[in-house]
Amino acid sequence: MTKQISPLQKARAAYKPKLPKVFMQYGSNVVPTLGAPTESIADQKEINALFPNTYGLPVITFEKGASDAGALVKAGVILSGGQAPGGHNVIAGLYDGLKKLNASNELYGFKGGPSGLTDNSYVLFDDAFIDEYRNTGGFDIIGSGRTKLEKEDQFDKVIANCKALGITALVVIGGDDSNTNACMLAEYLLKKNTGIQVIGCPKTIDGDLKNEWIETSFGFDTATKVYSEIIGNIQRDANSAKKYWHFIKLMGRSASHIGLECALKTQPTYAIISEEVAEKKMTLRQIVTDIAKAVKTRAEAGKDFGVVLVPEGLIEFVPEVKKLIDELNDLLAENAAHFDTLSDDDKLQFVSSKLTSESNQAFSILPFSIKQQLLMDRDPHGNVQVSRIETEKLLIDLVGDLLSEWKSKGEYKGKFSFQNHFLGYEGRCAAPSNFDADYCYSLGYTASALIGAGKSGYLSSVRFLTKPADQWVAGGVPLTMMMNLERRHGKDKPVIKKALVELDKKPFLTFVANREKWIAEDAFQYPGPIQYFGPTEVCDQPTITIQLEH
Ligand code: FBP
Protein backbone atom coordinates (compact mmCIF):
# COMPACT_ATOMS: atom_id res chain seq x y z
CA MET A 1 0.00 0.00 0.00
CA THR A 2 1.36 3.44 -0.85
CA LYS A 3 1.91 5.70 2.12
CA GLN A 4 -0.75 8.43 2.45
CA ILE A 5 0.66 11.87 3.13
CA SER A 6 -1.23 15.10 3.68
CA PRO A 7 -1.14 17.88 1.07
CA LEU A 8 0.88 20.03 3.48
CA GLN A 9 3.43 17.24 3.99
CA LYS A 10 3.70 16.90 0.23
CA ALA A 11 4.25 20.61 -0.22
CA ARG A 12 6.79 20.71 2.63
CA ALA A 13 8.69 17.79 1.13
CA ALA A 14 9.25 19.95 -1.95
CA TYR A 15 10.50 22.93 0.11
CA LYS A 16 14.13 23.76 -0.69
CA PRO A 17 15.84 24.97 2.47
CA LYS A 18 18.05 28.02 2.11
CA LEU A 19 21.78 27.95 2.85
CA PRO A 20 24.34 30.58 3.85
CA LYS A 21 25.59 32.46 0.81
CA VAL A 22 29.05 30.89 0.90
CA PHE A 23 27.55 27.45 0.21
CA MET A 24 24.89 28.72 -2.21
CA GLN A 25 27.54 30.44 -4.34
CA TYR A 26 30.60 28.26 -4.02
CA GLY A 27 29.27 24.82 -3.11
CA SER A 28 32.17 22.76 -1.81
CA ASN A 29 34.75 25.30 -2.96
CA VAL A 30 35.07 26.78 0.49
CA VAL A 31 37.95 26.96 2.93
CA PRO A 32 38.02 27.62 6.66
CA THR A 33 39.37 30.96 7.85
CA LEU A 34 40.87 30.61 11.30
CA GLY A 35 40.45 33.21 14.04
CA ALA A 36 42.68 33.69 17.08
CA PRO A 37 43.15 30.87 19.63
CA THR A 38 40.25 30.70 22.10
CA GLU A 39 39.88 30.26 25.86
CA SER A 40 37.11 28.51 27.77
CA ILE A 41 34.50 30.86 29.26
CA ALA A 42 35.72 30.07 32.80
CA ASP A 43 38.05 27.74 34.72
CA GLN A 44 40.62 28.02 31.89
CA LYS A 45 43.44 26.21 33.70
CA GLU A 46 41.33 23.21 34.63
CA ILE A 47 39.57 22.93 31.24
CA ASN A 48 42.92 23.22 29.43
CA ALA A 49 44.36 20.43 31.58
CA LEU A 50 41.34 18.19 30.91
CA PHE A 51 41.27 18.84 27.14
CA PRO A 52 44.90 19.28 26.04
CA ASN A 53 44.18 18.24 22.43
CA THR A 54 41.08 20.33 21.79
CA TYR A 55 41.68 23.38 24.00
CA GLY A 56 42.42 26.75 22.45
CA LEU A 57 41.31 25.95 18.89
CA PRO A 58 40.42 29.00 16.76
CA VAL A 59 36.88 29.96 15.75
CA ILE A 60 36.30 29.11 12.07
CA THR A 61 34.32 30.83 9.31
CA PHE A 62 33.98 29.47 5.81
CA GLU A 63 34.91 31.55 2.81
CA LYS A 64 35.36 31.03 -0.90
CA GLY A 65 38.52 29.13 -1.77
CA ALA A 66 39.95 26.12 -3.51
CA SER A 67 39.42 23.27 -1.07
CA ASP A 68 41.40 20.07 -1.36
CA ALA A 69 38.32 18.17 -0.16
CA GLY A 70 37.44 15.22 -2.29
CA ALA A 71 38.97 12.33 -0.38
CA LEU A 72 36.38 9.69 0.45
CA VAL A 73 34.61 10.25 3.78
CA LYS A 74 32.40 7.86 5.67
CA ALA A 75 30.60 9.70 8.44
CA GLY A 76 28.20 8.70 11.21
CA VAL A 77 25.49 10.77 12.87
CA ILE A 78 23.46 10.48 16.08
CA LEU A 79 20.49 12.38 17.47
CA SER A 80 20.85 12.81 21.21
CA GLY A 81 18.45 13.89 23.97
CA GLY A 82 14.99 15.38 23.59
CA GLN A 83 13.34 15.81 20.21
CA ALA A 84 13.48 19.23 18.52
CA PRO A 85 11.88 20.31 15.23
CA GLY A 86 14.37 20.27 12.39
CA GLY A 87 16.60 17.34 13.37
CA HIS A 88 15.78 15.58 10.12
CA ASN A 89 16.95 18.61 8.16
CA VAL A 90 20.29 18.63 9.98
CA ILE A 91 20.79 15.09 8.73
CA ALA A 92 19.57 16.03 5.23
CA GLY A 93 21.97 19.01 5.11
CA LEU A 94 24.84 16.84 6.34
CA TYR A 95 24.03 14.17 3.76
CA ASP A 96 23.76 16.65 0.86
CA GLY A 97 26.93 18.47 1.97
CA LEU A 98 28.92 15.23 2.15
CA LYS A 99 27.68 14.16 -1.29
CA LYS A 100 28.64 17.55 -2.67
CA LEU A 101 32.18 17.05 -1.36
CA ASN A 102 32.38 13.66 -3.03
CA ALA A 103 29.41 11.79 -4.51
CA SER A 104 30.80 8.54 -3.11
CA ASN A 105 30.85 9.78 0.49
CA GLU A 106 28.63 7.80 2.84
CA LEU A 107 26.53 8.72 5.86
CA TYR A 108 25.57 6.20 8.54
CA GLY A 109 22.81 6.96 11.05
CA PHE A 110 23.30 5.34 14.46
CA LYS A 111 19.97 4.37 15.97
CA GLY A 112 18.41 5.29 19.30
CA GLY A 113 20.88 8.00 20.33
CA PRO A 114 24.40 7.59 21.73
CA SER A 115 23.79 3.92 22.57
CA GLY A 116 23.53 3.22 18.82
CA LEU A 117 27.22 4.09 18.56
CA THR A 118 28.32 1.69 21.28
CA ASP A 119 25.86 -1.05 20.29
CA ASN A 120 26.72 -0.69 16.59
CA SER A 121 23.08 -0.28 15.60
CA TYR A 122 22.98 1.70 12.36
CA VAL A 123 21.47 2.35 8.94
CA LEU A 124 23.24 3.52 5.82
CA PHE A 125 21.41 6.47 4.26
CA ASP A 126 20.65 6.80 0.58
CA ASP A 127 18.73 9.43 -1.40
CA ALA A 128 15.32 7.76 -1.05
CA PHE A 129 15.76 7.34 2.70
CA ILE A 130 16.71 10.99 3.24
CA ASP A 131 14.06 12.36 0.84
CA GLU A 132 11.28 10.84 2.92
CA TYR A 133 12.28 12.95 5.93
CA ARG A 134 13.13 16.34 4.42
CA ASN A 135 11.43 19.23 6.27
CA THR A 136 9.55 16.86 8.57
CA GLY A 137 9.41 17.10 12.37
CA GLY A 138 10.47 14.43 14.84
CA PHE A 139 13.58 12.33 15.26
CA ASP A 140 12.07 9.11 13.98
CA ILE A 141 14.51 8.82 11.09
CA ILE A 142 16.93 7.07 13.49
CA GLY A 143 15.44 7.81 16.92
CA SER A 144 17.15 9.46 19.87
CA GLY A 145 18.19 8.56 23.39
CA ARG A 146 19.70 9.97 26.56
CA THR A 147 22.48 7.45 27.22
CA LYS A 148 25.47 9.31 28.55
CA LEU A 149 28.54 8.66 26.44
CA GLU A 150 31.38 9.55 28.78
CA LYS A 151 33.38 6.52 29.82
CA GLU A 152 36.54 5.25 28.19
CA ASP A 153 35.18 1.74 27.65
CA GLN A 154 32.24 3.32 25.75
CA PHE A 155 34.65 5.41 23.69
CA ASP A 156 36.70 2.29 22.89
CA LYS A 157 33.54 0.58 21.61
CA VAL A 158 32.83 3.63 19.44
CA ILE A 159 36.35 3.41 18.00
CA ALA A 160 36.01 -0.31 17.27
CA ASN A 161 32.61 0.14 15.59
CA CYS A 162 33.79 3.09 13.51
CA LYS A 163 36.96 1.28 12.43
CA ALA A 164 34.93 -1.76 11.37
CA LEU A 165 32.73 0.45 9.15
CA GLY A 166 35.56 2.69 7.99
CA ILE A 167 33.93 5.75 9.60
CA THR A 168 36.28 8.71 10.06
CA ALA A 169 33.86 11.41 11.28
CA LEU A 170 30.98 11.56 13.75
CA VAL A 171 28.30 14.22 14.09
CA VAL A 172 26.50 14.56 17.42
CA ILE A 173 23.21 16.46 17.23
CA GLY A 174 22.42 17.39 20.81
CA GLY A 175 22.05 19.90 23.62
CA ASP A 176 24.58 21.10 26.19
CA ASP A 177 25.02 17.74 27.94
CA SER A 178 25.32 15.77 24.68
CA ASN A 179 27.80 18.24 23.23
CA THR A 180 29.80 18.13 26.47
CA ASN A 181 30.10 14.39 25.84
CA ALA A 182 30.93 15.07 22.17
CA CYS A 183 33.80 17.23 23.39
CA MET A 184 35.08 14.45 25.65
CA LEU A 185 34.82 11.99 22.76
CA ALA A 186 36.68 14.35 20.40
CA GLU A 187 39.46 14.73 22.96
CA TYR A 188 39.75 10.98 23.50
CA LEU A 189 39.76 10.18 19.77
CA LEU A 190 42.54 12.72 19.21
CA LYS A 191 44.53 11.46 22.18
CA LYS A 192 44.31 7.93 20.79
CA ASN A 193 45.29 9.11 17.31
CA THR A 194 42.27 7.42 15.75
CA GLY A 195 41.82 9.90 12.92
CA ILE A 196 38.09 10.06 13.73
CA GLN A 197 36.69 13.61 13.83
CA VAL A 198 33.78 14.76 16.03
CA ILE A 199 31.48 17.67 15.19
CA GLY A 200 28.47 18.82 17.25
CA CYS A 201 25.23 20.58 16.22
CA PRO A 202 23.31 22.79 18.70
CA LYS A 203 19.90 21.26 19.35
CA THR A 204 17.24 21.87 22.00
CA ILE A 205 13.82 23.48 22.08
CA ASP A 206 14.86 24.91 25.47
CA GLY A 207 16.97 27.57 23.73
CA ASP A 208 19.67 27.36 26.40
CA LEU A 209 22.57 26.30 24.20
CA LYS A 210 23.58 29.71 22.93
CA ASN A 211 26.34 32.27 23.30
CA GLU A 212 28.10 34.93 21.30
CA TRP A 213 28.75 32.47 18.46
CA ILE A 214 25.72 30.21 18.68
CA GLU A 215 22.78 32.60 18.40
CA THR A 216 20.13 29.97 19.08
CA SER A 217 19.69 26.23 19.27
CA PHE A 218 17.49 24.70 16.62
CA GLY A 219 13.90 23.77 17.46
CA PHE A 220 13.34 26.77 19.76
CA ASP A 221 11.74 28.77 16.94
CA THR A 222 9.20 26.11 15.94
CA ALA A 223 8.38 24.92 19.46
CA THR A 224 7.68 28.45 20.71
CA LYS A 225 5.52 29.13 17.65
CA VAL A 226 3.46 26.00 18.29
CA TYR A 227 3.09 26.75 22.01
CA SER A 228 2.19 30.36 21.30
CA GLU A 229 -0.54 29.30 18.92
CA ILE A 230 -2.04 27.09 21.64
CA ILE A 231 -1.63 29.76 24.34
CA GLY A 232 -3.36 32.23 22.00
CA ASN A 233 -6.23 29.77 21.55
CA ILE A 234 -6.55 29.31 25.31
CA GLN A 235 -6.48 33.09 25.80
CA ARG A 236 -9.26 33.43 23.25
CA ASP A 237 -11.28 30.88 25.23
CA ALA A 238 -10.51 32.58 28.54
CA ASN A 239 -11.58 35.89 27.08
CA SER A 240 -14.77 34.35 25.66
CA ALA A 241 -15.94 32.26 28.62
CA LYS A 242 -14.52 34.66 31.22
CA LYS A 243 -14.68 32.01 33.92
CA TYR A 244 -11.32 30.27 34.25
CA TRP A 245 -7.79 31.01 35.26
CA HIS A 246 -5.59 28.87 33.01
CA PHE A 247 -2.21 27.83 34.41
CA ILE A 248 0.01 26.69 31.55
CA LYS A 249 3.31 24.99 32.28
CA LEU A 250 5.74 25.32 29.40
CA MET A 251 8.52 22.87 28.66
CA GLY A 252 12.10 23.96 29.12
CA ARG A 253 14.08 21.88 31.61
CA SER A 254 15.98 24.69 33.20
CA ALA A 255 16.03 28.11 31.55
CA SER A 256 12.82 30.10 30.94
CA HIS A 257 13.59 31.10 27.34
CA ILE A 258 10.50 29.27 26.08
CA GLY A 259 8.27 30.96 28.67
CA LEU A 260 9.74 34.37 27.91
CA GLU A 261 9.43 34.04 24.13
CA CYS A 262 5.84 32.79 24.45
CA ALA A 263 5.04 35.67 26.81
CA LEU A 264 6.45 38.18 24.32
CA LYS A 265 4.42 36.59 21.55
CA THR A 266 1.11 36.15 23.38
CA GLN A 267 1.06 38.81 26.16
CA PRO A 268 -0.58 36.66 28.84
CA THR A 269 -2.05 38.00 32.07
CA TYR A 270 0.93 36.77 34.06
CA ALA A 271 4.20 34.96 33.38
CA ILE A 272 6.88 33.71 35.73
CA ILE A 273 10.54 33.77 34.72
CA SER A 274 12.56 31.36 36.84
CA GLU A 275 15.81 33.32 36.58
CA GLU A 276 14.11 36.36 38.15
CA VAL A 277 12.81 34.18 40.98
CA ALA A 278 16.37 32.99 41.67
CA GLU A 279 17.87 36.49 41.38
CA LYS A 280 15.32 37.96 43.81
CA LYS A 281 15.65 34.88 46.05
CA MET A 282 11.87 34.56 46.05
CA THR A 283 10.19 31.97 48.25
CA LEU A 284 7.35 29.82 47.03
CA ARG A 285 5.09 31.86 49.29
CA GLN A 286 6.14 35.12 47.56
CA ILE A 287 5.56 33.67 44.09
CA VAL A 288 2.11 32.49 45.13
CA THR A 289 1.28 35.81 46.79
CA ASP A 290 2.18 37.73 43.62
CA ILE A 291 -0.08 35.55 41.47
CA ALA A 292 -2.90 35.76 44.01
CA LYS A 293 -2.60 39.55 44.01
CA ALA A 294 -3.00 39.57 40.22
CA VAL A 295 -6.09 37.37 40.57
CA LYS A 296 -7.48 39.74 43.21
CA THR A 297 -6.77 42.87 41.16
CA ARG A 298 -8.63 41.45 38.21
CA ALA A 299 -11.49 40.17 40.38
CA GLU A 300 -11.97 43.75 41.62
CA ALA A 301 -12.38 44.80 37.97
CA GLY A 302 -14.96 42.02 37.50
CA LYS A 303 -12.53 39.69 35.67
CA ASP A 304 -12.36 36.24 37.19
CA PHE A 305 -10.20 34.88 34.40
CA GLY A 306 -6.70 35.03 33.05
CA VAL A 307 -3.72 33.07 31.79
CA VAL A 308 -0.55 32.32 33.78
CA LEU A 309 2.58 30.94 32.13
CA VAL A 310 4.73 28.75 34.36
CA PRO A 311 8.20 27.62 33.25
CA GLU A 312 8.83 23.91 33.64
CA GLY A 313 12.05 24.36 35.59
CA LEU A 314 10.61 26.86 38.09
CA ILE A 315 10.91 24.89 41.30
CA GLU A 316 14.64 24.33 40.83
CA PHE A 317 15.07 28.12 40.81
CA VAL A 318 13.23 28.76 44.07
CA PRO A 319 16.24 28.95 46.43
CA GLU A 320 14.66 26.93 49.26
CA VAL A 321 13.54 24.20 46.81
CA LYS A 322 16.86 24.28 44.93
CA LYS A 323 18.71 23.63 48.18
CA LEU A 324 16.30 20.81 48.89
CA ILE A 325 16.80 19.30 45.41
CA ASP A 326 20.60 19.56 45.66
CA GLU A 327 20.48 17.71 48.97
CA LEU A 328 18.10 15.12 47.53
CA ASN A 329 20.36 14.61 44.46
CA ASP A 330 23.39 13.91 46.64
CA LEU A 331 21.35 11.76 49.00
CA LEU A 332 19.86 9.68 46.18
CA ALA A 333 23.23 9.32 44.41
CA GLU A 334 24.96 8.17 47.62
CA ASN A 335 22.21 5.78 48.71
CA ALA A 336 20.85 4.60 45.36
CA ALA A 337 20.91 0.86 46.09
CA HIS A 338 19.34 1.18 49.54
CA PHE A 339 16.76 3.71 48.34
CA ASP A 340 15.49 1.36 45.62
CA THR A 341 14.58 -1.26 48.22
CA LEU A 342 12.30 1.12 50.21
CA SER A 343 8.52 1.53 49.99
CA ASP A 344 7.15 4.98 49.10
CA ASP A 345 6.42 5.84 52.75
CA ASP A 346 9.82 4.60 53.91
CA LYS A 347 11.49 6.67 51.21
CA LEU A 348 9.84 9.79 52.61
CA GLN A 349 10.90 8.90 56.13
CA PHE A 350 14.44 8.06 55.08
CA VAL A 351 14.78 11.36 53.25
CA SER A 352 13.33 13.39 56.13
CA SER A 353 15.77 11.79 58.54
CA LYS A 354 18.74 12.88 56.40
CA LEU A 355 17.79 16.37 55.17
CA THR A 356 18.98 19.53 56.93
CA SER A 357 16.28 21.20 59.01
CA GLU A 358 15.90 24.02 56.44
CA SER A 359 15.30 21.56 53.60
CA ASN A 360 13.07 19.43 55.78
CA GLN A 361 10.93 22.49 56.35
CA ALA A 362 10.73 23.18 52.58
CA PHE A 363 9.96 19.50 51.91
CA SER A 364 7.25 19.31 54.56
CA ILE A 365 5.08 22.06 53.05
CA LEU A 366 4.93 20.36 49.64
CA PRO A 367 1.89 18.26 48.77
CA PHE A 368 2.44 14.48 48.85
CA SER A 369 2.30 14.16 45.05
CA ILE A 370 5.08 16.73 44.56
CA LYS A 371 7.21 15.09 47.25
CA GLN A 372 6.94 11.83 45.36
CA GLN A 373 7.73 13.51 42.06
CA LEU A 374 10.91 14.97 43.59
CA LEU A 375 12.04 11.49 44.60
CA MET A 376 11.57 9.96 41.15
CA ASP A 377 14.53 8.64 39.14
CA ARG A 378 16.99 11.21 37.81
CA ASP A 379 17.79 11.29 34.09
CA PRO A 380 21.17 9.81 33.01
CA HIS A 381 22.76 13.24 33.49
CA GLY A 382 21.61 13.32 37.14
CA ASN A 383 18.89 15.92 36.53
CA VAL A 384 15.48 15.93 38.20
CA GLN A 385 12.96 15.13 35.45
CA VAL A 386 11.11 18.41 35.79
CA SER A 387 8.68 17.61 32.97
CA ARG A 388 7.15 15.08 35.37
CA ILE A 389 6.70 17.56 38.24
CA GLU A 390 3.30 19.20 38.20
CA THR A 391 4.38 22.70 39.19
CA GLU A 392 1.31 24.27 37.59
CA LYS A 393 -0.95 22.21 39.86
CA LEU A 394 1.17 23.03 42.89
CA LEU A 395 0.73 26.76 42.16
CA ILE A 396 -3.01 26.39 41.59
CA ASP A 397 -3.34 24.63 44.98
CA LEU A 398 -1.29 27.20 46.84
CA VAL A 399 -2.90 30.22 45.12
CA GLY A 400 -6.34 28.71 45.84
CA ASP A 401 -5.45 28.26 49.52
CA LEU A 402 -4.23 31.83 49.84
CA LEU A 403 -7.30 33.27 48.11
CA SER A 404 -9.55 31.28 50.45
CA GLU A 405 -7.61 32.74 53.38
CA TRP A 406 -8.15 36.25 51.99
CA LYS A 407 -11.80 35.49 51.31
CA SER A 408 -12.37 34.41 54.91
CA LYS A 409 -11.00 37.79 56.01
CA GLY A 410 -13.19 39.60 53.49
CA GLU A 411 -10.16 40.72 51.47
CA TYR A 412 -11.07 38.89 48.25
CA LYS A 413 -14.53 38.56 46.77
CA GLY A 414 -13.85 36.89 43.43
CA LYS A 415 -14.33 33.34 42.19
CA PHE A 416 -11.20 31.31 41.49
CA SER A 417 -11.96 28.54 38.98
CA PHE A 418 -9.02 27.10 37.14
CA GLN A 419 -7.72 24.79 34.43
CA ASN A 420 -4.22 23.41 34.13
CA HIS A 421 -2.22 22.61 30.99
CA PHE A 422 1.25 21.38 30.16
CA LEU A 423 2.65 22.31 26.76
CA GLY A 424 5.71 20.28 25.90
CA TYR A 425 5.27 17.25 23.70
CA GLU A 426 2.79 19.21 21.55
CA GLY A 427 5.65 21.17 20.03
CA ARG A 428 8.83 19.11 20.20
CA CYS A 429 8.16 17.17 17.01
CA ALA A 430 6.25 19.73 14.96
CA ALA A 431 7.18 20.21 11.31
CA PRO A 432 9.99 22.80 11.38
CA SER A 433 9.13 26.42 10.66
CA ASN A 434 10.82 27.94 7.61
CA PHE A 435 13.44 29.34 9.97
CA ASP A 436 14.22 25.97 11.56
CA ALA A 437 14.04 24.14 8.21
CA ASP A 438 16.67 26.53 6.79
CA TYR A 439 18.76 26.80 9.97
CA CYS A 440 18.90 23.04 10.54
CA TYR A 441 19.76 22.27 6.94
CA SER A 442 22.51 24.91 7.14
CA LEU A 443 23.88 23.48 10.42
CA GLY A 444 24.11 20.01 8.87
CA TYR A 445 25.67 21.35 5.69
CA THR A 446 28.20 23.35 7.75
CA ALA A 447 29.03 20.19 9.73
CA SER A 448 29.90 18.49 6.42
CA ALA A 449 32.20 21.42 5.55
CA LEU A 450 33.94 21.11 8.95
CA ILE A 451 34.43 17.42 8.26
CA GLY A 452 35.75 18.21 4.77
CA ALA A 453 38.19 20.68 6.35
CA GLY A 454 39.48 17.93 8.68
CA LYS A 455 38.29 19.66 11.89
CA SER A 456 37.35 18.01 15.19
CA GLY A 457 36.03 19.26 18.53
CA TYR A 458 33.83 21.93 16.91
CA LEU A 459 30.18 22.89 17.14
CA SER A 460 28.66 23.74 13.77
CA SER A 461 27.75 27.42 13.77
CA VAL A 462 25.51 29.56 11.55
CA ARG A 463 25.34 33.24 12.48
CA PHE A 464 23.53 36.50 11.70
CA LEU A 465 20.24 34.66 11.89
CA THR A 466 18.01 37.75 11.98
CA LYS A 467 19.13 38.53 8.42
CA PRO A 468 17.79 36.66 5.39
CA ALA A 469 19.31 33.18 5.12
CA ASP A 470 21.51 34.03 2.16
CA GLN A 471 23.40 36.45 4.44
CA TRP A 472 24.03 33.88 7.15
CA VAL A 473 27.67 33.11 7.97
CA ALA A 474 28.75 29.49 8.42
CA GLY A 475 31.61 28.23 10.57
CA GLY A 476 32.60 26.32 13.68
CA VAL A 477 33.10 27.14 17.37
CA PRO A 478 35.48 25.06 19.52
CA LEU A 479 33.47 23.03 22.03
CA THR A 480 36.02 23.67 24.79
CA MET A 481 35.40 27.40 24.42
CA MET A 482 31.90 27.01 25.89
CA MET A 483 33.00 24.99 28.91
CA ASN A 484 33.27 25.61 32.62
CA LEU A 485 33.30 23.48 35.76
CA GLU A 486 29.97 22.69 37.42
CA ARG A 487 28.93 20.51 40.34
CA ARG A 488 27.30 17.28 39.12
CA HIS A 489 26.62 14.17 41.21
CA GLY A 490 28.58 15.77 44.02
CA LYS A 491 31.70 16.35 41.85
CA ASP A 492 33.14 19.22 39.77
CA LYS A 493 32.69 18.32 36.09
CA PRO A 494 33.60 20.10 32.86
CA VAL A 495 30.35 21.00 31.08
CA ILE A 496 29.09 23.37 28.41
CA LYS A 497 27.55 26.30 30.26
CA LYS A 498 23.78 26.56 30.01
CA ALA A 499 22.59 29.96 28.81
CA LEU A 500 19.91 31.18 31.21
CA VAL A 501 17.62 34.17 30.62
CA GLU A 502 19.72 37.28 31.24
CA LEU A 503 17.84 39.80 33.34
CA ASP A 504 19.70 42.82 31.97
CA LYS A 505 19.06 42.01 28.30
CA LYS A 506 16.34 43.27 25.99
CA PRO A 507 14.01 40.23 25.83
CA PHE A 508 13.52 40.20 29.62
CA LEU A 509 13.48 44.02 29.91
CA THR A 510 10.81 44.23 27.21
CA PHE A 511 8.70 41.77 29.18
CA VAL A 512 9.21 43.73 32.43
CA ALA A 513 8.25 46.99 30.72
CA ASN A 514 4.88 45.51 29.75
CA ARG A 515 3.84 42.98 32.35
CA GLU A 516 1.92 45.28 34.73
CA LYS A 517 -0.16 46.43 31.78
CA TRP A 518 -0.90 42.81 30.84
CA ILE A 519 -2.38 42.15 34.32
CA ALA A 520 -4.70 45.12 34.21
CA GLU A 521 -5.69 45.13 30.55
CA ASP A 522 -6.44 42.19 28.35
CA ALA A 523 -3.56 42.57 25.95
CA PHE A 524 -3.80 38.99 24.69
CA GLN A 525 -2.20 38.26 21.33
CA TYR A 526 -3.35 35.36 19.17
CA PRO A 527 -0.38 34.44 16.95
CA GLY A 528 -2.13 31.59 15.10
CA PRO A 529 -0.38 28.60 13.54
CA ILE A 530 3.05 28.52 11.92
CA GLN A 531 2.80 29.83 8.39
CA TYR A 532 4.81 27.90 5.86
CA PHE A 533 3.68 29.72 2.73
CA GLY A 534 2.83 33.35 2.17
CA PRO A 535 4.37 36.77 2.67
CA THR A 536 7.76 36.94 4.36
CA GLU A 537 6.54 39.14 7.22
CA VAL A 538 4.15 36.35 8.19
CA CYS A 539 6.21 33.25 7.37
CA ASP A 540 9.85 34.02 7.93
CA GLN A 541 10.03 35.92 11.21
CA PRO A 542 12.58 34.58 13.69
CA THR A 543 11.77 34.58 17.41
CA ILE A 544 11.25 37.91 19.21
CA THR A 545 14.04 36.82 21.58
CA ILE A 546 16.67 36.63 18.82
CA GLN A 547 15.40 39.85 17.20
CA LEU A 548 15.75 41.74 20.49
CA GLU A 549 19.12 40.16 21.23
CA HIS A 550 20.66 41.05 17.85
P1 FBP B 1 17.06 18.43 25.48
O1 FBP B 1 17.74 19.43 26.34
O2 FBP B 1 17.69 17.10 25.48
O3 FBP B 1 16.87 18.96 24.09
O4 FBP B 1 15.60 18.17 26.06
C1 FBP B 1 14.66 19.14 26.10
C2 FBP B 1 13.39 18.69 26.78
O5 FBP B 1 12.33 18.77 25.86
C3 FBP B 1 13.12 19.53 28.02
O6 FBP B 1 12.45 20.71 27.68
C4 FBP B 1 12.32 18.60 28.88
O7 FBP B 1 12.46 18.89 30.25
C5 FBP B 1 12.92 17.28 28.57
O8 FBP B 1 13.44 17.36 27.25
C6 FBP B 1 11.95 16.16 28.68
O9 FBP B 1 12.57 15.00 28.27
P2 FBP B 1 11.91 13.57 28.35
O10 FBP B 1 10.74 13.59 27.42
O11 FBP B 1 13.01 12.67 27.91
O12 FBP B 1 11.49 13.37 29.76
Image (tube, rainbow, N blue to C red):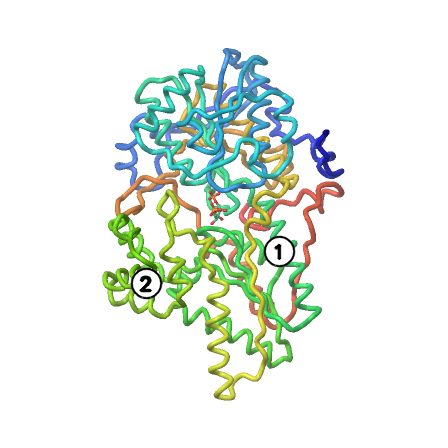
SS class, disc 2: helix
User: In this image, 56 relative to 420: left or right?
Assistant: left
In the image, residue 124 lies at what x, y percent? Answer: 54, 21
Q: Is residue 35 above or below residue 305?
A: above
Task: State which quarter of the image contains the N terminus.
Answer: top right
Position of residue 208 measured from the top left corner of the image (x, y, whole percent) = 47, 46
Count neighbours of disc 1 (C-alpha within 10 A) and say few if under 14, some if 14 to 19, many if 20 or more.
many
Say left or right for 234 vs 310. Answer: right
Question: Residue shown at 29%/66% (left/top)?
Answer: 360
User: In the image, which disc is placed on residue 265?
Assistant: 1
Total numbered circles: 2
Inspect the image, locate mark 2, and give the three-letter code of the amino acid beneath it: Asp
Residue that mark 2 sits on: 345
Specify the label residue 210 is tagged with.
none
Q: Quadrant of the C terminus?
A: top right
Q: Amino acid at mark 1?
A: Lys
Give how far across and how far down residue 40 sits, in percent: 35, 37
Label 1–label 2 contact, CB within 8 A = no
For image coordinates 29% across by 52% down, the residue present is 341
